Amino acid sequence: MKKILVLLLFFWVSFSAFSQSFYRYRFEEPWSFSVSAGPTQYLGELYSFWKYQEGVQPDWNANVGVSYTFGTNLRARGNFSYIQMSGQDPPADPRSNRNPRNLNFRARNWEVNGTIEYYFRPVKVNNITRELWNFYIFAGLGMSTNNPETQLRGEWVDLRPLQLENNPYEKYIVVIPTGIGFKYKLNVYMDLTLEGSYRWTFTDYMDDISAFNISEFYLDLVDDYVTGNNPDRLRLAVRNPNFLNDIGEPDVDKILRNGGRIRRGSGLDERFDGYLTVNLGVEIYFSRDIWDNFIFRNRVNEKAFRFW
């Protein structure tokens, strides 16, 4: 009889331990943290993906985010990103007639945005029953810095303060991120994520170029150059070798005789600039016991008897 009682006690303790080991996963884990990185592709006056076949000219970006599950298939996410982008004329499709402009830019932007994600499979579930894979779409609203630069005499120059087209534009711009993503469950606490996003903007000056040519403002540029008030404006606006003299400076006589009909913009139907990002990363769910496992194990109670 005593052996039977001991055996029953052993099975009860074992079952309790087994149940506890799984019970800790039977909670919804609404909060998560994610990190990701990947290529960035700018689209605007210095690059056309839709009209010409110009290949891919990627830069890179990195992103951190915090997400919260608030509906059966819905999650909200806040993102903070560092985004590099650039464009230049030399690899342009010959049909675009952009090569003679000899223009280029780069940008190093910081972005904050919030998005709403809709998942094709439920996400408001217990942590252990989270889907093995899940597709989602998303859209949101955000703000980004906007400070294009280009090189002059081997040094990078901020273009926004120079107002090359006599048209000031903001240091901060509104962006609308939209896209699609995929998640794969690596373990109870972590997902692998792959996400593609296009940022729509309301500015044509992410690359500092909008006007088709300089005819409307070339006299102001020439005046600043001749008087020495701000000669770099003309140097940066006109980089076409056909309108430079033997020492690489703007040829004022040629520019005046031409009436400022020197190509600057691309004449694209799409007036606003944008950029595409493709990111690979991981997402970690804030489980109730994640801090008590692996490297976060409670060392004070390390010697205590545990069943898991």
Image: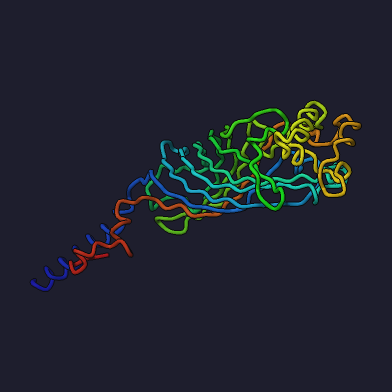
Q: Quadrant of residue 15?
A: bottom left
| Quadrant holding the N terminus | bottom left
In this view, the residue in front, 146 or 59, is 146
Please identify the residue farthest to the bottom as the structure is shown.
3
Please identify the residue farthest to the right as the structure is shown.
257
Q: Quadrant of residue 105?
A: top right
Q: Is residue 61 visible?
A: yes
**Residue for point 30% across, 51% down:** 288
**Residue for point 80% across, 46% down:** 102
**Residue for point 26% across, 57% down:** 20
Q: Position of residue 157 (x, y in %)?
A: 65, 45
Q: Position of residue 113 (x, y in %)?
A: 51, 38
Q: Compared with residue 11, is residue 31 higher up or lower down, i.e. above or below? A: above
Q: Position of residue 268 (x, y in %)?
A: 79, 34
| Quadrant holding the C terminus | bottom left
Left or right of residue 49: residue 145: left
Q: Position of residue 177 (x, y in %)?
A: 58, 37
In this view, the residue in front, 95 or 109, is 109
In this view, the residue in front, 99 or 159, is 159
